Image (cartoon, rainbow, N blue to C red):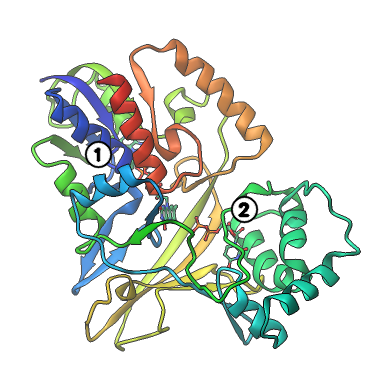
Amino acid sequence: MKYDYLIVGAGLFGATFAYKAKKTGKKVLVIDKRDHIAGNAYTKNIHGINVHEYGAHIFHTSDEKVWKFVNKFAEFNNYINSPVAVYNDELYNLPFNMNTFSKMWNIKTPAEARAIIDAQIKDLHITEPKNLEEQALSLVGTDVYEKLIKGYTEKQWGRPCTELPAFIIKRLPLRFIYDNNYFNDRYQGIPMGGYTEMVKRMLKGIDVKLSEDFFEFKKNGNKLSDGTKVKFNKLIFTGQIDEYYEYKFGALEYRSLRFETEELNEENYQGNAVVNYTAADVPYTRIIEHKHFEFTKAPTTIITHEYSKKWEKGAEPYYPVNNEENNALYEKYLALSKKDKNVIFGGRLGEYRYLNMDGIIADALALAKKEL
Ligand code: FAD
Ligand code: UDP
């Protein structure tokens, strides 16, 4: 079989590029080592509930083009992410907003909240935050940092906040209004029917082979597991760039996750899709109750405890750890890849960047425009 493009990874990057390539008349083959499409956005329907198998995925964007693009393949509901945080026996709204401050300090006005935060940070003398701890303290003061950030972040990243880059926390909005919407983006929602259905529509009419690991394929002289020989002009690779180059400069660092999913014989377990557990002594970071993403009516419910864990070769690489050391290592792989004219790296792992789904799709659309 002969193709213009072999695309490794049936996640959102691979599926977006594949869709565009097919539209311009290119012949593409998509392979994935997993037994399903949609990458980390994959949802599995269990007893009528779409379960986010690799963690909660909420689509949000301010990019008009990306929003129009995804709406071709799915109808989005009006879900607004409003997680709550549990710290010991206290419960707070996220992201950090007037509801959080009002509960924490029993106050009502933005001026009162500002005054408390200012009083808490005045002696810290942080002018230019050097790390996540300084960044968080200078934005929200000691109470919010100690109760809602420190424990969660150190569990999530497995290292002290003083050793983490400030940008991680900059993703979270901070507001002095009563608004629990976790995101600032113009558009937000969940594709009704699940992400897998959405990606299936993107890949309609495209050859897709699942349970095919690229490295096995390569080892077998570009043969699929059924023995079919594949010829292709160009490779789009959305797996790990360091693995592609056999870790020749060393392994990039990732953070991995462990999910424990169970079905409960009750209708509504926690009353919200996402509940974060911010205390250091609770081993998991959050509990997801999947039915609330799509307002699903079902007699039972499915919940997932999410645990963060150290990444080792072979484990699922969920989050790139973008500190200076790893970014420098990535630059070496990037330089090497630039010499390789027949392969293009893309996606969260190929680009070694912490990107949301909309950013991934925007990148794939940009690549398609340039390449096709
Ligand atoms: P992936 O989805 O990881 O797809 C890559 C695919 O390549 C995988 O299916 C993999 O099996 C395959 N692959 C890798 N190596 C090989 C190989 N050697 N051979 C064959 N196949 C291979 N984004 C949001 O916008 N909103 C959210 O709420 C959100 N929540 C998230 C929560 C968690 C816990 C995580 C980890 C991420 C979250 N994201 C969220 C980010 C989102 O998952 C990514 O932006 C998106 O899935 C990246 O798409 P991708 O195609 O780059 O990678
Ligand atoms: N964070 C926190 N407390 C929370 C939620 C998030 O301190 O209750 C911090 C934490 O450092 C985390 C970062 O904010 O890594 C980004 O959170 P987000 O929910 O965007 O992470 P993701 O859903 O991508 O894991």
- Estimate the x, y position of residue 78 in percent, counting from the top left: 30, 68
Q: Amino acid at mark 1?
A: Ala
Residue in the image at 50% along x and 15% along y: 336
Callout 2 environment at 10 Å: few (<14), some (14 to 19), or many (20+)? few
* Position of residue 358 measured from the top left corner of the image (x, y, whole percent): 38, 46
* Of residues 172 and 317, the one drawn nearer to the viewer in this rendering: 172
Q: Are marks 2 and 1 in contact (CB under 8 Å)?
A: no
Compare marks 2 and 1 and give the one earlier in the sequence. Answer: 1
Q: Is residue 86 left or right of residue 182?
A: right
Cα gap from disc 2 to disc 1, whole angstroms: 29 Å
- Quadrant containing the N terminus in the rendered view: top left
Asked which quadrant contains residue 194, the reply is bottom left
Quarter of the rendered image showing ligand 2: bottom right
Q: Tell me if I can see residue 287 in this picture.
A: yes
Q: Give 323 or 314, whichever is nearer the viewer.
A: 323
Disc 1 beta carbon < 8 A from ligand 1? yes
- The answer to whether residue 219 of the structure is visible from this angle is no
* Residue drawn at x 64%, y 55% as measured from the top left: 158
> Up-down: is 156 above or below 314?
below
Q: Secondary structure at mark 1?
A: helix
User: Which residue corresponds to mark 2?
Assistant: 170
State the residue at coordinates (16%, 41%): 203
Secondary structure under tag 2 reads helix
Q: Is residue 6 above or below residue 362?
A: above
Above or below residue 167? Residue 334 is above
